[in-house]
Image: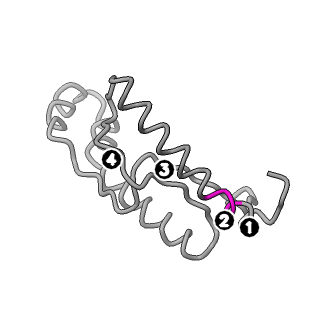
Amino acid sequence: MEEGCDKLIVVLTREHGYVKTTEKAIRITDKLYKKYPKIVEAMDTRAERYNEDVKKLDELERQGKVFVIAPETTLGVGRTESDPKKLRELYEEGYRIGREKMKKLRKYLECQDL
């Protein structure tokens, strides 16, 4: 937006309404990276910054300045999932949602050539 883009498309990997919480292992990070206080600070505030960014994104979406594609559910798949079947199901879910949103996306972009 700062560079003049007036049509933004954001693809989320978490459903609308997801709230990130501080990870329990954060204290380990504090000890491991005590020589690097900026890394510790970034990790300590990660959830807070993420949640604030999502609030801003929601507002931009309400204003029609951003088109957001987000899963309806993550089907219980976490960020370190390795089960090919679960990953395939999540991929299929994302593909379905993308197809469903295509008409609205075209309207948002004001073009018919997609």
Q: Residue drawn at (48%, 54%), measured in percent from left and top? A: 70
Depth check, front residue: 32 or 71? 71
Per the image, label 3 sits on a secondary structure element best described as loop
Which residue carries the number 2 mark? Answer: 104
Label 3 close to label 2 by CB (< 8 Å): no
Disc 2 to disc 4, C-alpha distance: 32 Å
Nearest the viewer among 88 and 110 is 88
Q: Secondary structure at mark 4?
A: helix
**Magenta segment includes 102:** yes
> In the drawing, what numbered circle is on residue 46?
4
Q: Are marks 4 and 1 in contact (CB under 8 Å)?
A: no
**Residue at left offset 28%, top offset 42%:** 76
The correct choice, above or below, for 98 with respect to 4 in the image is above
Q: Report the span colored magenta.
A: 101-105
Colour scheme of the picture? one colour
Question: Residue 34 is drawn in which quadrant?
Answer: top left
Q: Nearer the viewer, mark 4 or mark 1?
A: 1
Q: Tell us which disc is closer to us: 1 or 3.
A: 1
Pointer 1 residue? 107
C-alpha span from label 4 to label 1: 34 Å
Circle 4: is it few (<14), some (14-19), or many (20+) Cα within 10 Å?
some
Residue 108 sits in quarter: bottom right
In the rendered view, tell whether residue 54 sits above or below residue 13.
below
Residue 44 in the image: state x and y as whole percent: 25, 45
Residue at (33%, 44%) from the top-left corner?
75
Residue position marked by numbered label 3 in the rendering:
12
Task: Assess disc 2: are there few (<14), some (14-19) or many (≥20) residues with their C-alpha within 10 Å of its C-alpha.
Answer: few
Mark 2 or mark 4, whichever is nearer to me: 2
What amino acid is found at the position of numbered circle 2 in the picture? Answer: Lys
